[in-house]
Image (tube, helix red, strand yellow):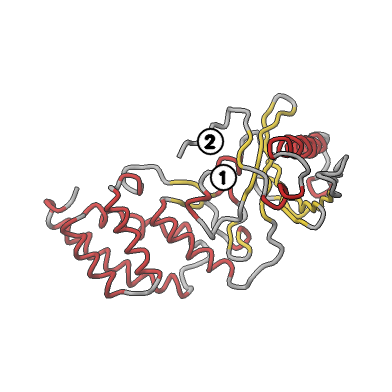
Amino acid sequence: MKKFNRFDHKNMGSLPEALRKIAAQDARAATREFNALMTELATDFIAQLSNGTQKNKITLTASRKLFGQDVKLEYVASGSVGTVYKMQVGDLSYAFKINRNSLHGELYAMALQRRARGLVNQAHIGAVFEFGGRKYSWVLSDYVARDRADGFESAMEKLYFAYLTKGLTINDAHPGNFKDGKLIDIPSLDTRDNKVDDIKQLTRVEQNMVARLAYYIKTNDIEKFTKTVEMARTTNPAVINYMFVAMKFGRPPMFVAGNTNDFSLKLRRFESVIDMAYRANKRAPELSR
């Protein structure tokens, strides 16, 4: 997957299907119209911010209708990277996120969403724009309106499996970043990129074995997990090395809310199996690579 070049002027993603349906022109023309309005609004936000207006006091008003529909914007919240508005286009609701820094925030992470299906709050389209000689960005995402009591733990489990099988990680995993069991603070999503703890260093067969082990953790099947680990210890020791580093050192930053929930307690049994296999291979260096 090609990495997003933050120095390019380019749009990413596409209009949501619901917006394309109400647009009275072809997809390219509709996208140009949409991008023009969103960039106008995002630029207005940065301009007000540069004039000293507090983030939560900045009011954005669409200067025209979009695809024949009224557009309403309501301030929701500001985080470490950007500010979110609820954008209503007719009866449709979206999250309009404006990056306040001269980096590209969520646009960089949009390409990673396919690796975490069902976890990341869907981002549809975004673009880079300039103001005062600096580059900023905006992105349109699904709007998540409510919180579930189990949303954080549910998302953490999903993220853990994406971490093991897709190489994804998150730098600031805390309850405020999750709603409805989905990650809404996309810039914190990233990939690991080192020789010790990078899923891409494994062969396709080894990656499939990691996915199988992750499935056994998910289904709490310690017996099949143990058998597969024992097989991998002799046939694919790189799988053991990868799982040991990921499970031993990768989990704590993702569970900053504490290690006392049921999922964290369950993981300890599986970690102990990997730990024993890893140490057995260390005693037999010819099995390691």
- Residue located 64% across and 43% down the image: 14
Name above or below for residue 286 compared with residue 150: above
> Do labels 1 and 2 touch, CB within 8 Å?
yes
Q: Give residue 172's position: percent from left, percent from top.
A: 55, 54
Q: Is residue 88 above or below residue 266?
A: above
Q: x and y percent of residue 163 in the render? A: 43, 55
Seen from the viewer's position, the closer of residues 216 and 196 is: 216
Which residue does the image show at 76% across and 49% down from the upper left?
Answer: 22
Badge 2 marks a residue whose secondary structure is loop
Marks 1/2: CA distance? 9 Å
Helix, strand or loop at mark 1: helix
Name the residue beneath numbered marker 2: 4
Q: Is residue 188 left or right of residue 228?
A: right
Badge 1 or badge 2: first in the primary sequence: 2
The amino acid at mark 2 is: Phe
Residue 26: give its label.
none
Specify the quadrant that holds the N terminus: top left
- Residue drawn 55% across and 44% down? 109
Compared to 196, does 240 lie above or below?
A: below
